[in-house]
Amino acid sequence: MSYGERPHKLTSFFTPQSPSSLSLINSANMETPYPKPITPSKTRIGWIGIGVMGNAMASRLLSAGYSVTVYTRTPSKALQLQSQGATLAASLFDVAKSSDVVFSMVGTPQDVRSVALDPDGIVSALNPGAVYVDTTSSHPALAREIFKVARERDCWAVDAPVSGGDIGARDGKLAIFAAGDSAVVQWLTPLFEVLGKPTFMGGAGCGQSCKIANQIVVGANLLGLSEGLVFADEAGLDVRKWRDAVKGGAAGSMAMELYGERMIEKDFRPGGFAEYMVKDMGMGVDVVEESEDERVVVLPGAALGKQLFSAMVANGDGKFGTQGLVSVIERINGK
């Protein structure tokens, strides 16, 4: 089922809204399309994709007092957000029509394309002045395409992928790489600041390029941390003492802060899936789309990192968190 299709059985999870209730949602006193100021009491938020990251991010907006309408292919996943006051919609179209700002946090560029650009997707249904914000790690060329289509409909699109994992999403400490029209990104600041720290990166697609570069660095940090832990263990060191000894020096990193203890404990519950790291790093090292061959950069370290994360997927561990990379290094060393 594509993201644009309506799920078949929703009746046990929500009651479809009547025309009068939809009219209430769309009433003038509950609309703040760009450039009207964003306020919790009036701005209507839509959210697509409520996995580990999306759920935590939408939850923070609800806690900040915003009205949030969600769509998911698996309605049971929305129960927690509904308990916080979220409304469950029947389709992408319904989310777009009842929102001033629609966020998405889905899996792959293919998912983003389906969510945003299918005939019954988000962009086709946005009201004039509404803004679509994609926080998925996706392709820069797709972000530029979505921006162009949105402008043709008198709407806006912002690519704003994030970094910080499930902990950053939960605590509102995500790094947000926002791109598109600078005035629109600035307008979104009240929402972004609920989720983390936004940085304007430039025109459409620059947020995604920033995230790819971010993932290249994160992948290298995770590989170095994995190898350091395995080496320290084989050398007979107490790995926690080793981590604590080096984290204040040049070896310290946010990867060590977020994932060091999880690696030691073999806690591979995902903040972000390892299979998505293959996708992210692949966008940096593989031939890019169509007429953009000149953008290919030779990145030997990232290419190795992609291979090792691909090994996790081949081992059946693609749904593990990225900290599970240590398991590949252990396998190589017969552990």
Image: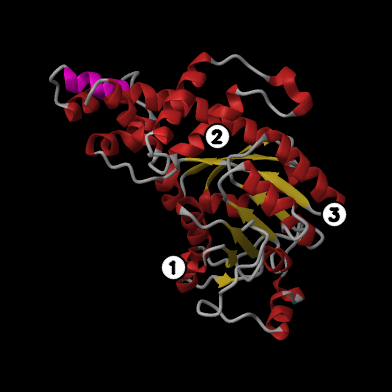
Mark 1 residue type: Gln
Rendered image: mark on residue 154: 3
Mark 3 or mark 1: which is in front?
A: 1
Which secondary structure lies at badge 3?
loop
* 289 w.r.t. 302: above or below: below
Q: Position of residue 188 (x, y in %)?
A: 66, 51
Q: Between residue 300 and residue 86, name the one nearer to us.
A: 300
Name the mark on residue 279: 2
Rounded to the nearest whole Å, what is the CA distance between mark 2 and mark 1? 29 Å
Residue 232 appears left or right of 300: left
Q: Which residue is denoted by mark 1 in the rendering?
A: 80
Residue 44 locus on image (x, y percent): 65, 66
Q: Quadrant of the C terminus?
A: top left
Q: Secondary structure at mark 2?
A: helix
Q: Residue at (59%, 25%) from the top-left corner?
A: 284
Mark found first going from the N terminus, 3 or 1: 1
Q: Are marks 3 and 1 in contact (CB under 8 Å)?
A: no
Residue 149 picture location, percent across and down: 82, 47
Q: Residue at x 51, y 58 (%)?
A: 50
Residue 288 has which mark? none
- Can I make out residue 54 in this image? yes
Three-letter residue code for mark 2: Lys
Q: Earlier in the sequence, mark 2 or mark 1?
A: 1
Up the image or down, 41 lies above or below 54; here it is below
**Circle 2: is it few (<14), some (14-19), or many (20+) Cα within 10 Å?**
many
Magenta-highlighted residues: 227-234
Front disc: 2 or 3: 2
Can you tell which quarter of the image residue 279 is in? top right
